[in-house]
Structure formats: structure tokens, C-alpha cells
Image (cartoon, rainbow, N blue to C red):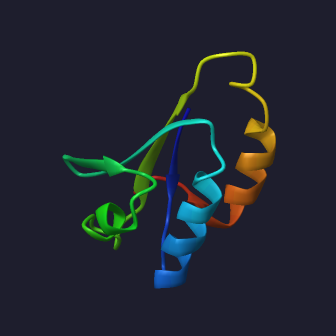
């Protein structure tokens, strides 16, 4: 699943990472040609946050892979935006 987020403040980065830590799978964040671990605060701060950042969720394997996806997306709503 891929979507875009806009991180306007430092606290937005912390809140996003805290939310993504509950996700059972890998998270990539991409800005331009750079991709970082979506759970790495330092990695996220190395991206160009003036523009929307592409987030790609790679589901984990097993029965619980889809569990909680709707709840996760609900928590991410404040950050979601359209790509520029």
C-alpha cells in the first residue's frame, strides 16, 4: 500500500514514527530518489520534508498481516495528503 504524507512540524515526525511502530511489516519512505526506513526518525529527517513524502507499507506475512490496517490508516489520517 502506498500513500503520501505531509510532515509540517518536528512533532509530526515523532507522531508518525510512533504510529508506524505498531505496523506489522516494513515501512519505506521516499522523497525524490532517496528511500529510508519509515521507522527511523533520523532517516526521515534526512529527507526533503518541504514536499509530500511517499510512504510504502510492505505487509508482513502470516494470518495477522491484514489485521489492524484500517485502524492504522485511521491514525495516519492527519498526515495524509495528495502528491505534488
Q: State left or right for residue 66 relative to residue 11.
A: right
Q: Quadrant of the C terminus?
A: bottom left
Q: Could one spot residue 9 in this view of the protein? A: no
* Residue 3 drawn at (x, y percent): 53, 44
Is 29 situated above or below 64?
A: below
- Quarter-of-image position of residue 77: bottom right
* Residue 48 drawn at (x, y percent): 27, 67
Please, which residue is most extreme toward the left here?
Answer: 33
**Residue at the (59%, 53%) spot, across then down:** 21
- Quarter-of-image position of residue 53: bottom left
**Residue at the (54%, 82%) spot, across then down:** 11
* Residue 38 drawn at (x, y percent): 43, 52
Please, which residue is most extreme toward the top here?
Answer: 62
Is 15 situated above or below 57?
A: below
- Quarter-of-image position of residue 42: bottom left
63 vs 50, nearest the viewer: 63
**Residue at the (78%, 53%) spot, across then down:** 74
**Residue at the (56%, 32%) spot, across then down:** 1
Q: State left or right for residue 30 relative to residue 27.
A: left
Q: State left or right for residue 9 relative to residue 16.
A: left
Amino acid at each position: 500500500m502506498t500513500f503520501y504524507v505531509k510532515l509540517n512540524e518536528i512533532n509530526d515526525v515523532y507522531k508518525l514514527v510512533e504510529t508506524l511502530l505498531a505496523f506489522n511489516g516494513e515501512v519505506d519512505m521516499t522523497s525524490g530518489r532517496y528511500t529510508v526506513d519509515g521507522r527511523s526518525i533520523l532517516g526521515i529527517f534526512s529527507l526533503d520534508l518541504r514536499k509530500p513524502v511517499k510512504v510504502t507499507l510492505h505487509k508482513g506475512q502470516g494470518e495477522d498481516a491484514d489485521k489492524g490496517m484500517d485502524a492504522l490508516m485511521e491514525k495516519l489520517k492527519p498526515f495524509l495528503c495528495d502528491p505534488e
